Amino acid sequence: MGKAARVRDTHSQGPLPACVEGFTRLQHPVTQIIDGSTLAGAADSQAAIEQPDEDVLATPAVVDDTSQPPTSAFATFGLCRELLDGLAAIGFEEPSPIQKAAIPELMLGRDLVGQAQTGTGKTAAFGLPLLERLEPGLRTPQVLVLTPTRELAMQVAEAFNSYASSMKGVKVLPIYGGADFRDQIQHLRRGVQIVVGTPGRVMDHMRQGTLDLSGLRSLVLDEADEMLRMGFIDDVQWVLEQLPAERQVVLFSATMPNEIRRISQKYLNDPAEVTIRQKAADGRRIRQRHLVVNGPQKLEALERVLEAEGSEGVIIFARTKAITLTVAESLEQHGYDVAVLNGDVPQNQRERTIERLRDGRVNVLVATDVAARGLDVDRIGLVINYDIPFDGEAYVHRIGRTGRAGRNGEAILFLTPRERRFLGGLERAVNQPIEAMEVPGNASINQHRLDRLREKLTLALQQPAGNPEERALLGEILQRVAQEQSCSPDQLALAALELSLGGKPLLLQGEERWGQSRPGAPSARDRDRDRSERRPFQDRHSERSEDGPEENMERFRIEVGWRDRVKPGNIVGAIANESGLTGRSIGKIRIFDAHSTVDLPKGMPDDVFADLRRLRVMNKELQISRLGS
Ligand code: AMP
């Protein structure tokens, strides 16, 4: 792309538009720390961002077509017209802080370390400059983005496609475990420039020669800390080792654990550093509360919370696949449009579920952490942590599903009395108190029901939904009944409204104080379940008992062990990504010298089993087999 080359030349010869406060534009800029993390914060944080300096702007670094005024603030980066058109089509007007800071660096081809979370606009921060620098005429992979999960891979690939919608010849391919291998090979053969994938599947393609990275120009490690958490970091290093010496490496991570720092020091060349510092105001956009409830009463407490606090889109986080199903079934019985997202849901169905959540056909999603990671749906108004997350980071990820795209969000955390002691840790993670609330009593639920009825009635008056012919018939019936019964319009309307309740009582009756009059003590089954739910993940994985697998689980043997330096995290991460299981539904792992055993839910589909056989961990094929077979 000639245009891109020209832009690059201009940049490397002259000063660049300076955008960020306190940032002196040098040839080798210093670390940038920017307040205002999220896109919603972008507007607020305008005060913190200086307008480009007049002198600097006088040296146009920008667009060829001077007859047209720049369409958006993005034009100052020197992006080509096609990209600006693509951005205009999806409604990006103002770059977010991370975009302001990162795009100029990446346009120069520099390596970059960005500390930023999902929701800050980080995808466009790397996507736009990498697209600008692409040679669409060359049909070989030039950009590789590694992501921890397939959901994120798909989202990033979609984002690239949307930015490049007006560019010709740009081919983006998401590749991840669990999807058809041959299909991916065919696409790769036909020629793609941008590959977005999870580490395991990318390595498989590299090893069998179907993904040739000899012409790669840029590698992006997206959510590097998540890749570390999921045990992919050795895989990531392996990929890094195979890349051409001349390449650009971009690393984005929400947090900067030491291992990630080490990778950055080892593989990145004099990287620009951009940190998006969480502004207190951003955190406050999500109102966070907690309530304390006994395990057996959680389900009813949930129904009450949904009735009294329910908003237009709700995500409920549960710890295990089984709990997602129990919760969803119960809510469905209470008339909610609910869907489940857990590791057992096949890929194509997951995509449909997210689409249904996005367009409002589903209002409540019950999900496990891994299945919902990176989920980006603007209309989520409430996140309920039905089960406490395992750590502060997971809590931050979960509540980040709300308060998106400039909206306000609510987050409610359920704690059993014994889990109360974890509250402080979560408060430290978000750096603010998580207020206490009560399980809503009858009075607030009843008030909510009255309010909703009023809203629905008003809406029905303002925007009648029925077809005109039927409305005319209904009008006739009303007139006729009014004449026959000689009643007033008020009396008639009241009767119609009561009829709309379908015989169900409008208000909850009885005990105002919830929880005190709950019948019976928890059953033994409830107690057992409560206990097993509380058992920390780490314990389950490090258990060294000689017992057989738990009910509903099956034990498998995999051909990787201590001598391969494998850790449970490597096994969990690889299997979770390839099979779509959540990390938490993977049971006991025992590591022996040359092999390990892992307990997985019964009923693994054959194709998943076949994929797992070929899956590589620590550079060795798992060769998974059923124990005893
Ligand atoms: P990300 O952090 O990349 O996951 O982006 C979060 C959300 O913000 C996505 O829905 C993006 O499409 C959207 N977004 C990113 N950059 C901008 C921008 N400059 N203006 C408006 N929306 C944006």
Image (spheres, rainbow, N blue to C red):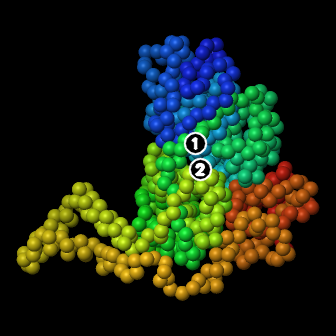
Q: Is residue 329 above or below residue 410?
A: below
User: In the figure, residue 307 lies in which quadrant?
Assistant: bottom left
Residue underneath mark 2:
431
Tell which of 238 and 140 is nearer to you: 238
Residue visible at 24% across and 71% down?
497
Identify the amino acid type marked 2.
Asn
On screen, 196 above or below 177? above
Q: Nearer the viewer, residue 499 or 381?
A: 381
* Label placed on residue 402: none
Residue sitting at 48 percent across and 54 percent down?
287
Looking at this view, is 169 or 280 the one in front? 280
Q: Which residue is mark 1?
A: 278
| Visible residue check, residue 170 | no
For the question of whether residue 189 can be seen, the reply is: yes
Question: Tag count in the figure?
Answer: 2
Residues packed near mark 1 inside 10 Å, few (<14), some (14 to 19) or many (20 plus): some
Q: Position of residue 549 (x, y in %)?
A: 78, 75
Image-based side of 479 in relation to 495, left or right? left
User: What residue type is disc 1 on?
Assistant: Gln
Look at 51% across and 18% down and name the residue there: 53
Q: Residue at x 81, y 35 (%)?
A: 266
Q: Is mark 1 within 8 Å of ligand 1?
A: no
Residues at circles 1 and 2 in contact by the CB criterion of under 8 Å = yes
Q: Secondary structure at mark 2?
A: loop
The picture places residue 264, in percent across and down from the top left corner, at 76, 36
Name the front one of labels 1 and 2.
Answer: 2
Which SS class for mark 1?
A: loop
Image position of 548 with respect to 463: above or below? below
Quarter of the image with the N terminus is top right
Rendering coords of residue 332 (x, y %): 47, 71
Give the quadrant of the C terminus: bottom right
Sequence-first tag of 1 and 2: 1
